[in-house]
Image: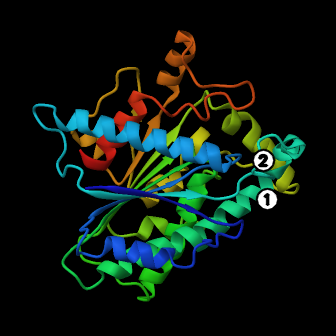
Amino acid sequence: MSHYITIPTNENGIIFDGDMNGVIAEAIAVDPFGFDDVYIYSHGWSTDAYRALDEYNRFSVDLAKQLLLLADQTPPIFAKPPQASLGIGIHWPSEITEDPNSDLNALQVFTFYTMEHRANAVGSNAVYSILRSLLSARAGTNSPLRIFLLGHSFGCKVVCAALQDMQIDIANKTIGVADGTTFRVVLLEPATDNDNLEPGDIYGAVGQIGGLRMLITKSSLDKALNTWFPLASKAANIFKAPKQALGAAGPTQNTIAYFGGADQIPIATGFKPDGTSVLKKKLIVADLSPVHQDRIAAGIAATDKLSGSHSDINFTEVYSMISGFLFA
């Protein structure tokens, strides 16, 4: 069996239900549930509770559908197929108000700096505490976890901030990790500086996590990250050169070297994983530009004038890409 829960937090990443960590620990205990796969999802900027629930429901169902379809292929492409899983969706307040009809929403564009830092707080508090509960429940056992973290836009900052603090505690031996535990991280169009994963930067410890692999997507059709992100970066850091977004330029060469190299793959229309070595490096950078361009030409892309293809992530090629990364 599998199960899915949604966890709301406040702006500081404090989980409203004080018993939730206990619920997670109970769910991840070896008996009676026996979940060995855990999915943690984080949405990005400007997403209210209603939209977050819609996005998580759609994304988790469509991903599960693609996993089932690919699992039936011959010859099999999944080295370690999906198992009974626990899904956790994080909803954090990434808008001025949760009321979709409020006039205050017109000011949302001016909250970039605030929400950027809020995403880090949510990761360092809420998601970190969830990871700590998961790992503590299996520490000292022979039942390792496969932990899959998926973020979109500022949700990638949520994921990376949590992993950063987790790795610091693992290195300090204040968190135990069951042997064989693995972390698969999917950063979809990440709205963070493209040097943030370098050693010594704000997420510099993430590359040291044992059993970690990371998939980063980028797209030249992502207007939010190619056009507006550098402008917002300049406005927030007047005396510094504007930074490029990770989901626009991809990771820096220093980051790639730190991770031991990277596979660079274009995602074209009809893309399907085949289990070959192209998806086996620790760091994979997937360029969505080709499929985004095709979807725009076909008139089926989920785009808008302000953000371009930034949120155009709910289609078969993306689900296939993620499936292959997680399990091929």
Location of the C terminus by quadrant is: top left
In the foreground, 309 or 40: 40
Where residue 32 sits in the image (x, y, percent)? 23, 72
Where's residue 50, x and y in %? Answer: 63, 45
Disc assigned to residue 114: 1
Q: Earlier in the sequence, mark 1 or mark 2?
A: 2
Label 2 amino acid? Asp
Q: Quadrant of residue 210?
A: bottom left
Q: Secondary structure at mark 1?
A: helix
Query: Taking 43 as reference, is 267 above or below it?
Result: above
The residue pinned by badge 2 equals: 99
Q: Residue at x 71, y 46 (%)?
A: 46
Which of the two marks, 1 or 2, is nearer to us in this view?
2
Colour mode? Answer: rainbow
Q: How many marks?
A: 2
- Give the side of residue 205 with respect to residue 121, left or right: left
Q: Residues within 10 Å of mark 1 (few under 14, many from 20)?
A: few
Q: Residue at x 78, y 47 (%)?
A: 99
Q: Could you say which is closer to the camera, residue 245 or residue 184? A: 184
Q: Is residue 106 above or below residue 178?
A: above
Question: 232 left or right of 258?
Answer: right
Secondary structure state at the residue bearing disc 2? loop
Residue 207 is labelled as: none
How many other residues sit within 10 Å of disc 2, few (<14), some (14-19) or many (≥20)?
few
User: Residue 205, how many percent across, how many down?
Assistant: 50, 70
Q: Amino acid at mark 1?
A: Thr
- Dot 1 and dot 2 residues touching (CB under 8 Å): no
Give the residue furthest to the left. 75
Task: Give the alpha-carbon distance from disc 1 to disc 2, as whole Å.
Answer: 19 Å
Q: Quadrant of the N terminus?
A: bottom left
Q: Which residue: 20% across, 49% down?
A: 81
